[in-house]
Amino acid sequence: MKKITLLLLISVFAAFAAACGSGTTSTTGDTAAGKTVKSGPAGNNLTATLSSKDGVLRKGKQDFTLTFTDAAGKPVDVGSVSLNFHMPAMGTMAVMNNPATFTTTSTPGVYAGKTDLEMSGEWQAQIKYEGPAGNGSANLPIVAQ
């Protein structure tokens, strides 16, 4: 009876550990940062990639990741970053600008971001950076749900 209980306990622990994952890149291209929302050129032969847990940005407060990579896909430290979610004026609706705040992560070139999008719809993610990789920018069109 003790052996069965021990085996069951080990099986439950192994299943839990497998479900939690290791936080590394998987074969489907998902990373610890989540799934890609949008990716595009950011100057200086770099690519900026915006990711979220489920690959979607939504109206309201949320966390996301901004990653800068070189041509080989290796993260590159770009120094200070800023991102403004911009929606132009439409009809009687005023221009909207929702800035993001960032903290660095343990991986250079990967930045943890927070924002609060006022509404769903089409936004321009206006990204700028300045630092060891030079100065650069990217404008990524995204749709918030």
Image (tube, rainbow, N blue to C red):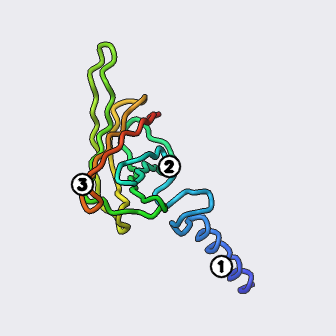
Q: Give the CA separation, mark 1 to mark 2.
A: 34 Å
Marks 3 & 2, CB-CB < 8 Å contact: no
Q: Is residue 89 above or below residue 128?
A: above
Q: What residue does disc 3 label?
A: 130
| Total marks placed | 3
State left or right for residue 88 relative to residue 37: left
Residue 61, position as x, y percentages in the image: 35, 42
Q: What residue lies at 41% left-to-right and 63% top-to-bottom?
A: 75
User: Which amino acid lies under the numbered mark 1 shown in the image of this protein?
Assistant: Ile
Label 2: which secondary element: strand
Residue 36 marker: 2
Tell me how far mark 1 sits from mark 3, CA to CA: 49 Å
x and y percentages locating residue 139 in the rendered image: 36, 39
Q: Which of 89 and 115 is in front in this view?
A: 89
Residue neighbourhood size for the residue with mark 3, other residues' Cα within 10 Å, grouped as few (<14), some (14–19), many (≥20): some
Q: In the rendered structure, find residue 10 and report the number of the disc placed on it.
A: 1
Question: Alpha-carbon neighbours of circle 1 within 10 Å: few (<14), some, or many (≥20)?
Answer: few
Residue 66 visible: yes
The alpha-carbon separation of the residues under discs 3 and 2 comes to: 23 Å
Determine the residue positioned at 27% across, 33% down: 97
**Quadrant of the rendered image containing residue 86:** top left
Q: Earlier in the sequence, mark 1 or mark 2?
A: 1
Which mark is in front, 1 or 2?
2
Please say if 37 is above or below 124. Answer: below
x and y percentages locating residue 107 in the rendered image: 38, 67
Which residue appears farthest toward the front when viewing the image? 44
